[in-house]
Image (tube, rainbow, N blue to C red):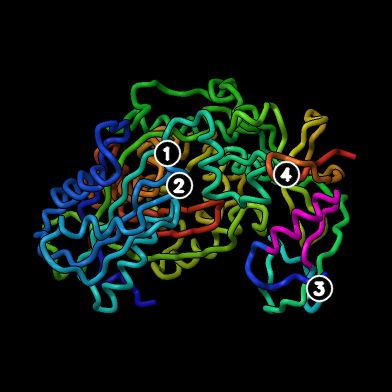
Amino acid sequence: MTVGGQGSASDVRAYRDGLARGEFVLPWCRSCARWRYPPGGRCPACRSADLEWTLVDPTGVVASFTIVHRSPSPQLEVPYGIVLVDLDATLRVMARAEDDLDRLRVGLEIEIFPIPWESSFVLMGRLR
Amino acid sequence: MTNPREVVSIVGASELPPGRYPHLDGLALLREALDAVLAASSLDPTAIDGLLVCPAGMISGGVTDVFVHERLADDLPRALRLSATMNVGGATYAAMIARSVDAIASGRARAVVCLGAGRFPPVRDDRGTLMAAMVAHPELELPVGAFIPALYALTATDLLHRHGLDRASLAAVAVAARAWALEHPLALQRLRGALTIDEVLEAPWVSTPFGLLDCSIPCEGGGGFIVAHASVLDPSIPRAEVLGIGEHHPHGMLTTARGLDAGCASPAIAQAFAVADVKPDDIDLWEVYDAFTSVPLAILPAAMGRSVADVAAAFRDGRTGPGGDLPVNTYGGLLSYGHTGDASGLSMIIEAVRQVSGTPIGRPVSEAELAFVHTYGGMLADHVSLVLGAQP
């Protein structure tokens, strides 16, 4: 499937559709061989709209983390973790962690997966 | 860029005391700020031909009045040659200096009044998420549970891990800020007494590695200054000369930042030093936007030309505090002076101007001739550095 290249609504929809299937997919620029993150219709480097929604390997490494003790919103129960996950050398994503918070350390292997959250989805991280 | 050394100074730097102003809305705060700046500058208001304004928008989750400069235009006596609403987060006011210097250097303005007001509400209910919506990606970061202290905590975890530091290094930054605040008559925490490392470490958790005392103090305020060509200034008016400016905008959101440390700020820092043609050893005082304790430890090494470990040791050994040889945030910083929301990028500039112009209202830094200021906005996304100097 090719990204339409017409603004962000279709990009967000394709991203959410992937999460709804339980898949983390992102646009991949075939000419630059790099992820288009955040998702968008054109590659910022080469301006190509020839982007392909591609399944991302969900295993990565904890780049940084924090354990939140004060909730920013009544919908979120503390404590929970926020993790920056390096999926490859050029792709970092943010995920929420709810299990094994005491074990969180920089450099550990972690797997990401989507779950429904409010009217959309959120990426979760689970230590391997 | 034209070297601004010959042409441009900052006068009239003043600020409402940080606090709560329940009887004033954002526009009323801006008018108070304008009054204070005009009174402090001793400048004939008919000399003012430029206006840059940042409205208080944080209270509404970043929704700002983008025409607020028009609402203030009739408070000035003459038609303007430069007028705009500006927001670059915490870097807004240093960026206003950059825009003003460019306009003055190219002959499009002579005296630009730069103003801001801010209302940083207490963080409760959904407010944390609302504020995070200003700086976090709505699909990719916000639903994760991102809020501003947690996002900065991610940079702090990285800093501590990368440089083998512990939370006591962060705490030392809060301790130094408090020591300066005790001697500043407007600092919010001036009556709270000195802090100890242990008190900072034992404060309730916010988001690891930050406890409550690693975070700045929310409050309200406003203020500004006038950036002016020497030809409109009476020689007797105290001023700080703008010697160097550097600017850098490396990314849009935390997750896409290429590195979470000073790497994203160093091009701005290097440019400011290069334009001013000075070295870190020449600097007499350092004013750096310190929304959280980790930020001075991330930014100052690039400015001081020292390692992170060296800078952390300087904080722990009292060298950055009152009487030290590397004075940092000599008014208490956002950590102990107060964080006025959208106006928070003002206080470190105002302090630098007051120190180098010989008009400090807190503890004077001895022989304060050259100040370095670093401000940033968003998630370390917008960086503007300044080198300010005393009038020769």
Label at residue A33:
3
Give the overall secondary structure of the magenta segment.
Answer: helix
Label at residue B334:
1
- Magenta range: A10-27
Is A102 magenta? The answer is no
User: Which residue does the numbered mark 4 point to in the structure image?
Assistant: A64
Q: Secondary structure at mark 1?
A: helix
Picture quadrant of residue A49: bottom right
Picture quadrant of residue B74: bottom left
> Does the rendering let one see residue B226?
yes
- Separation of marks 4 and 3 at Cα, in angstroms: 26 Å
- Separation of marks 3 and 2 at Cα, in angstroms: 38 Å
Which amino acid lies under the numbered mark 3 shown in the image of this protein? Ala
Residue B114 x %, y %: 28, 57
User: Is A68 located above or below residue B11 in the figure?
Assistant: above
User: Which residue does the numbered mark 2 point to in the structure image?
Assistant: B289
Which amino acid lies under the numbered mark 1 shown in the image of this protein? Leu
Q: Secondary structure at mark 2?
A: loop
Residue drawn at (77%, 59%), measured in percent from left and top? A91
- Separation of marks 3 and 1 at Cα, in angstroms: 43 Å
User: Is A104 located above or below residue B204 in the figure?
Assistant: below
User: Is B262 located above or below residue A8 in the figure?
Assistant: above
